[in-house]
Structures are given as structure tokens and as C-alpha cells.
Image: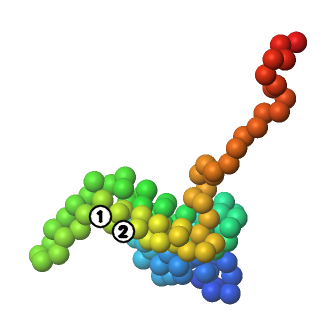
Amino acid sequence: MTFTNDLTTDRGVVRFNIGDTVENAGPRPDKRNYSDAEIDYLIATETAGNTAATALGFETLAGEWGAYTLSERAGEGSFDAKEVSGQFQKLADYWRKKPGGGTGGNSLQAGKLIQDFMEKGDDT
């Protein structure tokens, strides 16, 4: 897996925004990092820009953490993967609401679909 962290690139900005800046200590389960190819995918998918790509990164993290049922208690602290998922979703929502935050990928936008090739009364 290739991991680069250069803030002069879109990849580096998105990686910084999602807190994935230390190799082998990433925000994903098991402290995994996003690969460069995965960060590039976030950027390519969210054509609205780095803010939208950051939101998608947090949405992905929320989904990954939400798939776990892990809950641990160690001394005074505790850990719950579902809570971590919820925090990442809140961050995703925050980034989506920022200017340039995109629409969430494949979300339906308001509008009107007109199928002008099908006119009423034209049965032939």
C-alpha cells in the first residue's frame, strides 16, 4: 500500500482533513490508513472538490466502524465502535454542510423529469 502525505496535493489535503496523517496509525479499524489509491478514489468520486471528498472519507469511516460490534472497557475508559461510527458520521455531516461539500454522491436532487417522447394520447 502506498502512503504519501504531501499537503501541496489534493490527496494530502483530504488525508489531512480526515486525520490520516501518520502511517500505520490511521483512523480506520485496526489503525489502518487509506491507501493513496483510495484517497484518489474519494477525490475522483466527489467532483465538487476536496471538501466533498473529505465528507465521503468520513462517511466511509462511519460505515467501516459501524460494521463492528466491538465494545471494550479498560480502567476508567471505554470504547464502542458504534459510537466511533456516530462521531465520524457527524463529521461527515459537518463537511457536507460546508460550501463545496457536495451532495453525498448519488443522492437525488430536486427537479423534474420530463419524458417528452411519450405524449398522452399518442397510441400509435
Report if the CB atoms under discs 1 and 2 are less than 8 Å apart: yes
Amino acid type assigned to the residue bearing label 1 in the image: Glu
Q: Can you say which quadrant of the picture contains the N terminus?
A: bottom right
Q: Residue at x 72, y 40 (%)?
A: 113
Report which residue position mark 2 lands on.
Answer: 87
Marks 1/2: CA–CA distance:
6 Å
Residue furthest out toward the right: 124
Q: Quadrant of residue 3?
A: bottom right
Residue 103 in the image: x percent, y percent?
Answer: 60, 60
Q: Looking at the image, can residue 39 be seen?
A: no
Q: Looking at the image, can residue 95 be seen?
A: yes
Give the colour scheme of this rendering. Answer: rainbow
- Label 2 Cα neighbours within 10 Å, binned few <14 / some 14-19 / many ≥20: some
Disc number for residue 83: 1
Residue 22 in the image: x percent, y percent?
Answer: 48, 82
Amino acid type assigned to the residue bearing label 2 in the image: Gln
